């Protein structure tokens, strides 16, 4: 076939000729542009499909079980309510902006890896894993100020005339900084994850094993420790008291598996066998046998202005075994924070520790004891955690978490 000179075959303007001949000379460039365009379109369409999927519950359910007990469907306000609004997975989990969606996708890639790593866990470890995963969701929602919840729930639009007395007290300012909806409302769709006695004891044992108390350091007891006044009594097993979970101790000397410790606290007049963490607050730190009372060094008496009772600051030195102690109280507080969130938000909104004084918490927690899966040491540590956060704290104890 004869090659027709371009200018002869063309009917268009001259400038067009020029362009055409150039284009013919650079087909790869055109191809690249076309291919780029195609890729762009494909990516656009792909993103569109992906976004649509991220907004569809069916997509989530292709991997996830609904995780709502079927008998509960009707009871759950998010699935069945007067206006007939059914909340879907992406409403609470994905978010509406591009940043939210990218963050969801990035976090998910990691989740799937995590899931594979836990495939052959025992039932107990799977429960513990669910607690971990749920706590990541809580942390994320806290960090966002519960933004997904507030897209539907606007505190300004709440009809407060219909609040219960408790909701009125607790929700004076539901958008209060540092306390978002999720701080108090957990398990709004799924059952709150289970804390088992095994998970609880295992978490604290791991912390205690990783702790190596040295002279001059502070430690916190996480289980009840036997207390001895002299080393000989310790070796003979003649216990002269107990240090209870939550007590904060100063390590004076390390001798093999024994520690010489100093305990500072308060005694109330007429009840010398108990040493408490703060004046006027029954936050038990140690209980002493009658024979141990003479070893206590008392300071001057103080009258508690709130109650008129007489208290005195005391110190006591003695020996304890070096296990069951943790050198980083913050790590204990984070286990306790998770335990509290999961155990105490399953029947009602999570109460603020400040709803009660340290002394009032003693009664409330002893009434709850049979509802909780913890042993005596666990109950005592949870009580101590609530007392510490309730507003009146001992000076030398660590600050409570966030
Ligand atoms: C391809 C399967 C798959 C799809 C589709 C999927 N997920 Fe997941 N998702 C997983 C796996 C696996 C995990 C990890 C679970 C675990 O570790 O127990 C996970 C974890 C989660 C978590 C826990 C988050 C965290 O911070 O660890 C949430 C919430 C979640 N998915 C919500 C969703 C929602 C909402 C959708 C729909 C938009 C969705 N998933 C779609 C597989 C999937
Ligand atoms: C009303 C808000 C809301 C809706 C709707 C919702 N979730 Fe959740 N989801 C949460 C919260 C809050 C948590 C953290 C644990 C808790 O408090 O129950 C959570 C936790 C999770 C977890 C972590 C493991 C666990 O069981 O706690 C997964 C996985 C998950 N959701 C998937 C889904 C899927 C799939 C759907 C749709 C069937 C869905 N969620 C619907 C609020 C919601
Ligand atoms: C898509 C909208 C939507 C989202 C997102 C949403 N909710 Fe709701 N929520 C509702 C509706 C609708 C009701 C039912 C109201 C009724 O019963 O009149 C409800 C009820 C509630 C209730 C009272 C009943 C109960 O289950 O205790 C609480 C508490 C609550 N939501 C908290 C939350 C929290 C916390 C989040 C975020 C994790 C959230 N909601 C996310 C729409 C939503
Ligand atoms: C300081 C804790 C606290 C915070 C923060 C909080 N709430 Fe509440 N809320 C409560 C308590 C307590 C109740 C009473 C009902 C209960 O015990 O479950 C309640 C009740 C409710 C109810 C009514 C339930 C009913 O039908 O009786 C809704 C809805 C609700 N909260 C949503 C929210 C939303 C949305 C946010 C965030 C903007 C929020 N709450 C923040 C503690 C809190
Ligand atoms: C098995 C369900 C259940 C669990 C788990 C639960 N509670 Fe309660 N709680 C209730 C009920 C029911 C009431 C209301 C009846 C009452 O006053 O005894 C209540 C009332 C309360 C009150 C107000 C009345 C009072 O005695 O001060 C506080 C505070 C409280 N709970 C704190 C907690 C704490 C902290 C935990 C976790 C250690 C917890 N709850 C775990 C069911 C539960």
Image (cartoon, grey):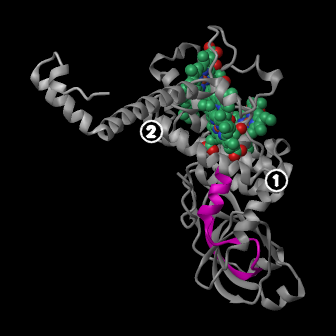
The CA distance from mark 2 to mark 1 is 39 Å
Q: Nearer the viewer, residue 52 or 44?
A: 44
Q: Regarding ligand 3, which quadrant of the image does it lie in?
A: top right
Residue 265 among those drawn in magenta:
no
Res 158 seen here: yes
Image x and y of residue 203, in percent: 74, 60
Task: Identify the image quadrant of residue 245.
Answer: bottom right
Please give left or right for residue 71 compared with residue 46 in the image.
right
Across and down, in percent, residue 267 comes to: 67, 66
| Label 2 secondary element | loop
Which residue is nearer to you in this view: 356 or 215? 215
Q: Residue at x 61, y 51 (%)?
A: 307
Which tag is nearer the camera, tag 2 or tag 1? 1
Residue designated by label 2: 177
The residue pinned by badge 1 equals 121
| Whether residue 228 is situated above or below residue 128 in the rendered picture | below
Q: Is residue 212 above or below residue 357?
A: below
Q: Residue at x 64, y 51 (%)?
A: 337
Q: Residues within 10 Å of mark 2 (few under 14, many from 20)?
A: few
Q: Inspect the magenta stretch and tell me whether residue 325 lies in it.
A: yes
Is residue 107 shown above or below 101?
Answer: below
Give the residues drawn in magenta, as a range: 311-339
Q: Vertically, is 321 above or below 309?
A: below
Name which of mark 2 and mark 1 comes first in the sequence: 1
Q: Residues within 10 Å of mark 1 (few under 14, many from 20)?
A: few
């Amino acid at each position: 076939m004869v090659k027709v000179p371009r200018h002869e075959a063309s009917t268009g303007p001259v400038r067009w000729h020029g362009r055409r001949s150039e284009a013919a000379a650079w087909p790869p460039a055109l191809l690249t542009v076309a291919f780029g365009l195609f890729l762009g379109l494909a990516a656009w369409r792909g993103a569109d499909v992906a976004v649509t999927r991220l907004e569809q519950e069916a997509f989530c359910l292709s991997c996830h079980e609904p995780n709502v007990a079927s008998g509960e469907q009707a009871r759950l306000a998010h699935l069945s309510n007067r206006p007939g609004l059914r909340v879907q997975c992406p409403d609470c989990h994905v978010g509406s902006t591009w940043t939210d969606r990218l963050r969801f996708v990035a976090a998910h890639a990691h989740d799937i890896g995590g899931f594979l790593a836990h495939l052959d866990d025992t039932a107990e470890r799977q429960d513990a894993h669910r607690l971990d995963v749920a706590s990541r969701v809580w942390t994320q929602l806290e960090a966002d100020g519960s933004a997904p919840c507030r897209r539907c729930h606007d505190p300004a639009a709440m009809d407060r005339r219909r609040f219960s007395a408790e909701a009125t007290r607790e929700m004076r300012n539901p958008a209060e900084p540092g306390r978002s909806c999720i701080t108090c409302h957990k398990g709004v769709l799924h059952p709150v994850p289970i804390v088992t006695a095994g998970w609880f004891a295992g978490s604290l044992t791991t912390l205690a094993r990783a702790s190596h108390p040295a002279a001059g350091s502070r430690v916190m007891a996480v289980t009840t420790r036997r207390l001895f006044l002299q080393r000989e009594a310790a070796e003979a097993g003649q216990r002269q008291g107990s240090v209870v979970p939550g007590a904060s101790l100063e390590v004076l000397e390390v001798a093999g598996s024994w520690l010489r410790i100093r305990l500072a606290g308060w005694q109330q007049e007429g009840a010398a066998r108990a040493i408490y963490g703060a004046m006027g607050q029954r936050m038990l730190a140690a209980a002493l046998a009658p024979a141990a009372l003479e070893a206590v060094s008392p300071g001057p008496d103080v009258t508690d202005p709130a109650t008129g009772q007489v208290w005195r600051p005391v110190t006591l030195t003695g020996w304890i075994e070096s296990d069951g102690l943790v050198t980083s109280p913050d790590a204990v507080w984070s286990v306790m924070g998770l335990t509290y969130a999961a155990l105490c938000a399953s029947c009602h909104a999570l109460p603020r520790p400040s709803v009660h004084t340290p002394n009032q918490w003693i009664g409330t927690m002893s009434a709850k004891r049979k509802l909780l899966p913890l042993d005596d040491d666990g109950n005592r540590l949870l009580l101590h955690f609530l007392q510490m956060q309730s507003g009146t704290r001992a000076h030398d104890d660590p600050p409570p978490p966030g």
